[in-house]
Amino acid sequence: MTTTNEVRAIGQTAALPVTSARSLVPTTIPEPVPGPHDLLVEVRAVSVNPVDVKLRGGSEPDGGVRVLGFDASGTVRAVGDAVTLFAPGDEVFYAGAIDRPGSNAERQLVDERIVGRKPSTMSHTEAAALPLTAITAWESLFDKLRIAPDATGTLLIVGGAGGVGSIAIQLVRTLLPGVRVIATASRPESEAWVRDLGAHDVVDHHGDLAAQVLDVAPDGIEWILTTNSAGQLPAYEQVLRPFGQIVAIDDPEQVDVVLLKSKAITWHWEFMFARSLHGAADLAEQHRILDEVADLVDIGRIRGTATTVLRPITAETLREAHRLVESGRVIGKVVLTDEPAA
């Protein structure tokens, strides 16, 4: 039982492997009180991302219990006195902020400026799969690579069947009709997934990546969105045309960008938490992105990416979700939900 000023949560108390029953444990936390721009959200569904796995296994909590979780869909229960975008009762979805308590709790505070309206055609379960990956893909394509709506050329998406790749393929096919998509996939089921999402060509990132890309694009390509950069720069340099661009969302230990100089290739980092972590002046851009994604979902241009659903949200199911994501073999997204099965 929780008291009236406590909410249930699932917390991390130490950096532990997911096989340990102590890696993620049931706990209670004080009921959050909204600040000026905060929404207090009753969480109905969450999804697990690589950042959850990285923090759980490799980063010690800074004292006490840390609540992870960087995707959620739920209902607004209270708002801060400066909130203008939402009201109690609104259904919302969001990725949250890396420097605040996460979504693995009954109720969570989140700044309204990084929250979008939940797509009306989706359940909370379906919606929870989208925010982090949609923002990451959108910022990669439009803020970093700056691909224009009338652009022509070829984009390689390394990790096409993952959460970010699954959204990026759809955004390109929906908003960038002149751009050809080559996606990487290493298994028959992941190849089928990315082709169904709209990839024009598929190559195997476990093989000779450069040779495969140049086989389908002999003149080279203009852009790369990579979820796995370690050891790949020689291949990227080989397939990119002069003045090409790369945007990376992973955390390689080392990047030797000198390899890219002779072709004047540009390297970008994408980190969707940068805006909230550093209080960017355009913080509300993530609200706009999520609302646009919701619109695309509701008109049938973007489909959901939840492929594995675990019920209910408990420490046990959360550990299982972490295990699945940690395996590196997930297609789409793993979602945990308290909504009943349809």
Image: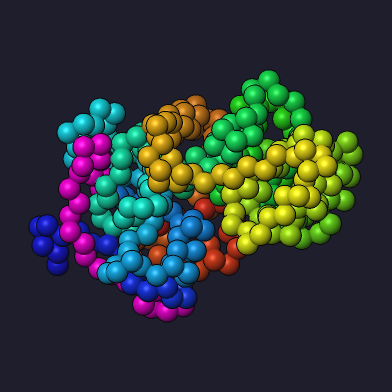
Whether residue 43 appears in this view of the structure is yes
Most distant residue in the top direction: 150
Which residue is at 48% across, 57% downward? 51
Q: Is residue 137 magenta?
A: no
Question: Quarter holding the N terminus?
Answer: bottom left
Residue 20, given in percent of the width and then of the height, sits at 42, 79
Asked where in the image residue 260 lies, by quadrant, the reply is: top right
Residue 34 shown in magenta: yes
Q: Which residues are magenta?
A: 19-42
The residue located at (78%, 43%) in the rendering is 261
* Residue 308 showing in the rendered view: no
Answer with left or right where residue 52 lies relative to residue 238. left
Indicate how the structure is coloured in the image: rainbow
Q: Position of residue 116 (x, y in %)?
A: 38, 35
Q: Residue extending furthest left?
A: 4
Relative horizontal placement of residue 207, taking residue 129 as reference (left or right):
right
Residue at 52% x, 53% y is 333
Q: Position of residue 179 (x, y in %)?
A: 72, 30
- Between residue 33 and residue 99, name the one nearer to us: 99
Q: Position of residue 319 (x, y in %)?
A: 42, 69
Q: Quadrant of residue 131?
A: top left
Q: How many marks?
A: 0
Residue at the image position 80 percent from the left and 53 percent from the top:
234
Residue 1 lies, with reference to residue 144, above or below; the image says below
Q: Is residue 252 left or right of residue 79?
A: right
